Image (tube, rainbow, N blue to C red):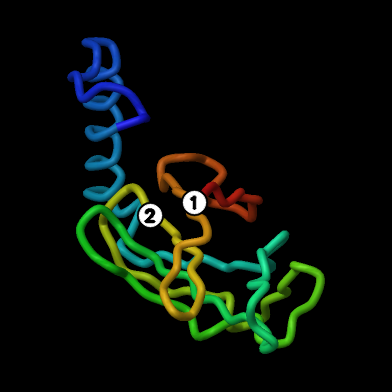
């Protein structure tokens, strides 16, 4: 594909990944990290609007780990304008996973992917409020 070759990572990269896996296992075993994850999404910014529809667009956010879907929000943003959708309680996701990475996919309500973001639970920013950017 266009993202590069399928070659194995270099030795240094593999060592860093092994260290991260060991650290993750230690945090799980000691109870410093649990399988309960709460993600609070406050707003979606610069959300594209479909040009062909007269009805306000609706969106969903799907959460996945490396193995399965963890949850999905209710439909969001039906009445929003200007590409910004503010979320209240509907932006709160309660998830259960022991994986260290969570993938969020922003989709139209009919399943077209708009963007995604990846959250590493090992990243210190994951423990406190932080802004994440969607990529397409």
Local SS, label 1: strand
* Among the two numbered marks 1 and 2 on one chain, the one whose residue lies closer to the N terminus: 2
Residue sitting nearer the eye, 11 or 116: 116
In the image, is residue 109 above or below residue 35?
below
Tell me the tag on residue 60: none
The picture places residue 50, in percent across and down from the top left corner, at: 63, 72
The picture places residue 126, in percent across and down from the top left corner, at: 52, 49
Q: Are marks 1 and 2 in contact (CB under 8 Å)?
A: no
Q: Residue furthest top?
A: 11
**Residue on which the image places disc 1:** 117
Q: Quadrant of residue 34?
A: bottom left
14 relative position to 70: left or right: left
In the image, is residue 18 above or below residue 102?
above
**Residue on which the image places disc 2:** 102
Residue sitting nearer the eye, 109 or 75: 109
Local SS, label 2: strand
Residue sitting nearer the eye, 34 or 113: 113
Q: Residue furthest right?
A: 82
């Amino acid at each position: 594909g266009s993202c590069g070759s399928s070659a194995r990572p270099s030795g240094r990269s593999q060592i860093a990944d092994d260290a991260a896996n060991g650290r993750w296992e230690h945090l799980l075993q000691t109870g410093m990290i649990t399988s309960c994850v709460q993600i609070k999404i406050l707003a979606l910014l610069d959300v594209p609007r479909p040009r062909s529809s007269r009805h306000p667009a609706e969106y969903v956010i799907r959460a996945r780990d490396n193995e399965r879907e963890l949850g999905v929000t209710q439909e969001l943003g039906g009445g929003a304008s200007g590409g910004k959708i503010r979320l209240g309680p509907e932006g709160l996701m309660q998830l259960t996973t022991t994986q260290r990475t969570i993938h969020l996919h922003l989709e139209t309500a009919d399943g077209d992917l708009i963007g995604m973001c990846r959250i590493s639970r090992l990243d210190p920013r994951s423990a406190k409020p932080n802004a994440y950017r969607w990529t397409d």
